[in-house]
Every structure is written in structure tokens, then in C-alpha cells.
């Protein structure tokens, strides 16, 4: 399964690195044929400078990535992404074709701007909850949860909550046993809501 993680200029580092680590570790530990292959995707496939000057070379751009089973949109300095029709159209198309779409932190704003979130229960970073409610009043924004699972859409709270959400996704796509093994291998205390 291809798990596409969308990254962009000033994306929050742990928002994409945490999920990437979860899925790559789960694949390494899996004894089945199910491979949860994380790939980093940027708009043009060129290197991206994330928060703190962390430079990342994505695997693909919009023009050459494989089909996605899961799309994850990360947070960070997200406002500019909400004003890019090319980005929003790509996200909407991927969300319509993927079996699961997720966001970490303020990635929920981008999903909502793209029309992938329309009326669902969602969450985001605690500091951004009032803005998400104001900008997208049709959403039901939940507080004090690590993630919200609405079936085909999952949103997580801020930064490290993306790891918890990704472990939940592993449990959905494969098994709870693999999610627990992955958390243990990562020496991570999985918070399950």
C-alpha cells in the first residue's frame, strides 16, 4: 500500500517524519505480504525546506508519484498552501481516490480548503482549534483528543499526535498486534485517543 505524505515549505518536521517512521517500521516488522510503504510527495518533487531549516528530498512530485492508497497531509506554516489551486486540486483528487485520507496538526486546514473535509468531526493542534472553527464552521472540531476517526477521514491533533494516529492507521490497515509491535520497536508510548 502506498502511503503518500504531502510535504511543503515550512512543514512541521515531526508531522511527516513521525508517520514515515511508523509506516516504515511497521513494514519492517510485518510478517505478512502487506507493505505499508510511506512516500514523501511535494508539489514539484524538488527538495523542501521544512521548519527549522530541515531540508528534505521528497520521493516524488505531483507529476510522477504512484497511485496512493492513503494520503496524509501534514501541518506547519500551512496558510500559503491553502491559496494554491494546483495543491488543493491535487489533494481533492487524491482524497477522492485513496481509501483513507488523514491530516496531522494544521493539515486539517488544507484538507478543508481542498474540500476533502466538508462536515466531519475533526481535530487539530490545540492552539489552532479556534481558527479551524472560525474558518470552517461546518466542521465539528473536537478538543482534547489525539485523533478523530471518521471512517475514510482521520485527523490528528498537533505534531506528536500524528504518530499516535499513524499507529491507529496501522491497526486499521493491518492489525492491532502490528501497531503495538511498531510502538514497542519505536520505544513509543502509544496514546490511544
Image: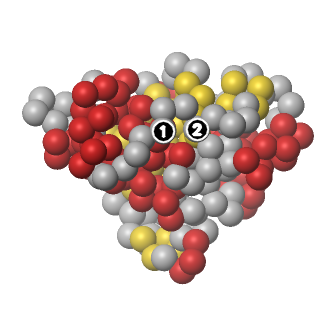
Single out the mark in the foreground, 2 or 1.
1
* Left/right of residue 94 with respect to residue 173 in the rendered view: right
Tell me if I can see residue 183 in this picture: yes
Q: Which residue is mark 1?
A: 191
* Left/right of residue 156 with respect to residue 140 in the rendered view: left
Q: Quadrant of the N terminus?
A: top left
Tell me if I can see residue 66 in this picture: no
Give the residue drawn at x 39%, y 63%. 58
Visual colour scheme: secondary structure
Q: Where in the figure is residue 170, as x and y percent of width and height?
A: 34, 33
Q: Where in the figure is residue 20, as x and y percent of width and height?
A: 36, 52
Q: Which residue is mark 2?
A: 146
Q: Where in the figure is residue 80, as x and y percent of width and height?
A: 72, 61
Q: Judge by depth and name the residue closer to the eye, 189 or 85.
A: 189
Quadrant of the rendered structure where residue 156 is? top right
* Left/right of residue 1 with respect to residue 172 in the rendered view: left
* Left/right of residue 125 with respect to residue 164 in the rendered view: right
Quadrant of the rendered structure where residue 41 is? bottom left
Q: Considering only order in the chain, which callout, 1 or 2, is on the residue closer to the N terminus? A: 2
Q: Are marks 2 and 1 in contact (CB under 8 Å)?
A: yes
Q: Is residue 6 above or below residue 120?
A: below
Amino acid at each position: 500500500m502506498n502511503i503518500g505524505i504531502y510535504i511543503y515549505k515550512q512543514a512541521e518536521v515531526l508531522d511527516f517524519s513521525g508517520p514515515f517512521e511508523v509506516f516504515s517500521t511497521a513494514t519492517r516488522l510485518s510478517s505478512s505480504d502487506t507493505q505499508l510503504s510511506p512516500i514523501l510527495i511535494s508539489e514539484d518533487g524538488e527538495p523542501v525546506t521544512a521548519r527549522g531549516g530541515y531540508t528534505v528530498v521528497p520521493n516524488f512530485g505531483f507529476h510522477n508519484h504512484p497511485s496512493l492508497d492513503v494520503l496524509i497531509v501534514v501541518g506547519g506554516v500551512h496558510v500559503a498552501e491553502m491559496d494554491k489551486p494546483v495543491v488543493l486540486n491535487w489533494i481533492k483528487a487524491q482524497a477522492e481516490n485513496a481509501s483513507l485520507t488523514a491530516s496531522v496538526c494544521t493539515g486539517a486546514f488544507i484538507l478543508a480548503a481542498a474540500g476533502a473535509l466538508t462536515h466531519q468531526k475533526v481535530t487539530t493542534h490545540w492552539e489552532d482549534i479556534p481558527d479551524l472553527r472560525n474558518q470552517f464552521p461546518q466542521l465539528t472540531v473536537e478538543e482534547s483528543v489525539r485523533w478523530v476517526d471518521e471512517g475514510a477521514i482521520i485527523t490528528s491533533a498537533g505534531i506528536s499526535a500524528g504518530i499516535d494516529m499513524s499507529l491507529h492507521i496501522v491497526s486499521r490497515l493491518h492489525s492491532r498486534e502490528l501497531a503495538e509491535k511498531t510502538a514497542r520497536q519505536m520505544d513509543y508510548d502509544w496514546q490511544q485517543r
